[in-house]
Structure formats: structure tokens, C-alpha cells
Amino acid sequence: MAVPRSDETRAIAAYLKASGVPHRITASTNHTALTLAGFASLHVLPGTNGPGRALDVAAPTSGRDTPELLAVFNAFRPVEHLLYELIYAGAAYNIKRGKPVLPYATASHHDHVHVAVARGVILPTPQPNMPPPVLEDAVPVVVQRSQGGAIVVTSDGGVFAVGPAPYLGSLPQAGVQHPAPIVGGAWAPLGDGYWLVARDGATFAFGNATPIPGGNVEPLRSHIGARPVVGVYCVNERLLELVALDTSRDGSPFDTYLASA
């Protein structure tokens, strides 16, 4: 096992150990000085108290694109807003320079997860017996933007931008772990903000999207009851229409509810 050398990489290793996810560290500073693209590797750049700000982490047994490797990747979701890089070919998104992006450098990242932080960033150690976040196996939602581009939204509120669409934030980056999965999203009319909506009707605003006050969300949830929200549409800059699945079988399979700012 490679030995972490800097305060930053020692904190990454401590975070992983406390998370309880089975893993093994395969590279710290025992790594080439340059990436395949020819840039200086974060494995060897100086940390605050020694060399290196990155670790390569594999599953206990060798393999490519395995559930065990995805578990290692998912272990970092609660702190991904603190990461500079998080690279794994088998994930729906990666992190590059602190922002979610489509997976990159995939050719060399099928058998391990690369994680790195900026100089001076020390990951917190999870509290003992803290349960890991529950991440449902849901297909990411693509939310098109009329001005061009789109965002891809994952069930835990992760967001990454595609094309000219701006990245304006996500739930993991904000440190939010909502108990219900995120099931949809909508762009603000000017394309300068977006909302995410959870299965229980909760909404989250980013950029210039107008927040929906809690007082307007709670009545909505009481009307929805056990009916799960499955999508959201933007009516205008202050009004969202939520679509819920009606399981009563006494009419339309869907009901709609308005959430106003």
C-alpha cells in the first residue's frame, strides 16, 4: 500500500478509513510526475507538509468498473464540494478543478478512483457510526436549457453541465443530503438558474432561480401525501408546476401541483 506523505493526503486516507468503505491505496507519491495530458500531477505537487495532494484508491480485489469501485467513488459524495479532482470512468460524472464534469481521462481510470484536493484543504473525518448516504440506483435526469446546453442531475442532487449551460451548484457541493431522491429539474426562463425537485416535493434553487419558501412547500407536500413527485416544469420565474404519480387509479395517472415563490 502506498503511504500518504502530506497533510492533505493523510486526511484523504483518514476520511476513507473512517467511512468504512473497503479499499486499498495504490498510489500516493509513487506516481509519474506528469499526467497523460502532460500536466504536473497532483500526486507529486507540494502539499502543506510534504509532497502530494492526490491518492489513487482501488477496491480490495482487482477489477474494472466494479460495484466496489463505485462505492469508493460514492464515499466522497458528502465532501465532493471540497475536492479538486475526483476521477473514475464508471461514474456518471467526475470532478475537475472543483466542478462536476462529464467523466474524463477514462482510459486510465477503470480500475481505481483518483481523488485530489487543493493545497491546504483537509477533509474532515466522518463521525463514528455515521450511516453512509443512501443513494438510489436512478437514471440521471437530463434537463435541457432553451438557450443551449443542459444539466445532468443525479438522484443525490449532483449536477454537471453539458455544452454552453452554466454549472451553478449542486446539493453535494452545498453539503446538503436530502432524505428523498432528486427526480427532476427545471431551468429559470433566462437560463441563469435552475431548480431541483425531490420525490417528496422539496425544491432547491441555484443561480438566479427564485427560492420557493418553506411555507409554500409544506402545504404542497400535504396535498401530495404519499404520491411521489416525478417531474417539474417552470411556469414562470416565480411559479413551478410539480407532477406527481397518482396511485389511486381513479382517473389520470398524474396529478399536478403549483409551488409559488
Image: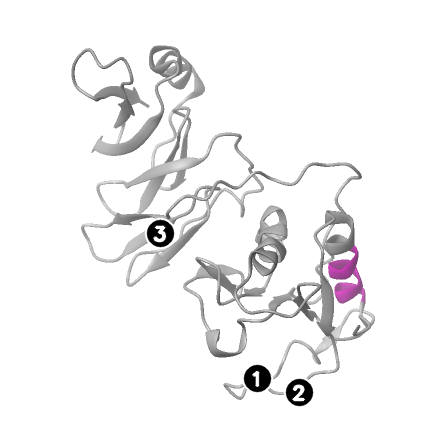
| Label 1 with label 2: CB-CB less than 8 Å | yes
- Where 240 falls versus 220 (above or below)? below
The residue under the point 34% across, 56% down is 166
| Mark 1 secondary-structure assignment | loop
Compare residues 97 and 11 and report the one nearer the observer.
Answer: 11
Rounded to the nearest angstrom, the CA distance separating label 1 from label 2 is: 7 Å
Q: Is residue 244 magenta?
A: no
- Inspect this view and state whether residue 236 appears: no
Rounded to the nearest angstrom, the CA distance separating label 1 from label 3 is: 27 Å
The residue under the point 55% across, 69% down is 64
The residue under the point 41% across, 22% down is 213
Residue 32 is marked as 2
Task: Inspect the image, locate mark 1, and give the three-letter code of the amino acid beneath it.
Answer: Thr
> Which residues lie in the magenta part?
7-14
Task: Inspect the image, locate mark 3, and give the three-letter code of the amino acid beneath it.
Answer: Val
Instruction: Tell me the residue that label 3 is attached to.
Output: 152
Task: Inspect the image, locate mark 2, and give the three-letter code of the amino acid beneath it.
Answer: Thr
- Inspect this view and state whether residue 69 appears: yes
Quarter holding residue 220:
top left
Main secondary structure of the magenta stretch: helix
Residue 22 in the image, given as x and y percentages of width and height: 71, 55
Q: The N terminus appears in which quarter of the rendering? A: bottom right
Residue 132 in the image, given as x and y percentages of width and height: 65, 41
Instruction: Tell me the residue that label 1 is attached to.
Output: 35
